[in-house]
Amino acid sequence: MSFQNKTVLITGASRGIGKAIGIKLAKEGANIIIASKSTEENPKLGGTIFSAAAEMEAADGKALPVQCDIRDEAQVQNAIDKGVERFGGIDILINNASAIALTNTETTEPKRFDLMYDINVRGTFFVSKACIPHLKKSGNAHILTLSPPVNMDMKWFANHLAYTMSKYNMSMIAMGLAAELKKYNIASNALWPRTTIATAAVNNLLGGDALMKMSRTTDILADAAYYILSKPSKECTGNTFIDEDVLAKEGITDLSKYSVVPGAQLYNDLFL
């Protein structure tokens, strides 16, 4: 599928994985609606909706930055309405925005639990709901959610129960939408990395500089997303993809270019 003049709404696209996917699709001629909160740069995180828009437009795409907290339905609807007014519709939704807290049950505070559920679960659900009427009008509509395969082995719950539940909920939304929207030819899939990815979350919350050097760049997920979204929506739906597997099916097995430090040992992601 050509992405020329296709419109993509990406939550959490001011930095990291969401921005990388936006730039990749912008290079292919897509219009990107950047639905994110950041209008002023946080030194620990970097990036705003405006700086991300500038990078996407420099990559030959069109970008519309809209301040949007996906916990607020009115702000979600505003981002969608502005995007549709500017570009004429929505063809693809990327549910990328997510909150993380790798705490065990005793140390998980109610406000942190609520933040993860409000963004990861409630936000993903209601952003998807609000986009459906527009996706129904697209010739090749896709929803792609950044969440892991659901594995009920207890080891995935042992260390950070609240976070695991919230991410599995995102995957359940992705799979549920695949079944519910199949009759409308709207695809819904999940995508997750095999290794840790060099983002602000990894640097600030997980392992600092040492783990960053054992990670891959966001480009690997951007490339994997590109191949998934290129597929006919009738044929490619209901999958929980791993980035490496997506690329392997495209004949791409040398992934060395994605390593932050060439040749470094890579660190497997939390859920794999």
Image (cartoon, helix red, strand yellow):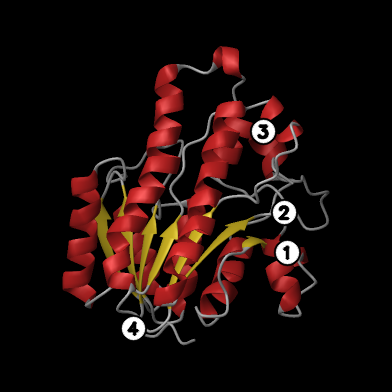
- Residue shown at the point (56%, 46%) measured from the top left: 199
Q: Do the residues bearing badges 2 and 4 touch, measured as CB atoms within 8 Å?
A: no
Vertical side of 164 occupied by 146: above or below:
below
Three-letter amino acid code at the position of disc 4: Asn
Q: Tell me the number on the disc at residue 244.
A: 1
How many numbered callouts? 4
State the image coordinates of residue 107 (x, y, percent, origin top left): 56, 14
Residue 225 is situated, as x and y percent measured from the top left of the image, at 56, 68
Q: Find disc 2 in the rendering and name its residue.
A: 194
Q: In terms of image quadrants, where is residue 259? A: bottom right
Q: What kind of element bears circle 3?
A: loop
Residue at horizontal 72%, vertical 50%? 195
Residue 5, labelled with which disc? Answer: 4
Who comes first in sequence, dot 3 or dot 2? 2
- Of labels 1 and 2, earlier in sequence is 2
Percent position of residue 8, x then y:
37, 69
Q: Amino acid at mark 1?
A: Glu
Which residue bears the numbered disc 3? Answer: 207
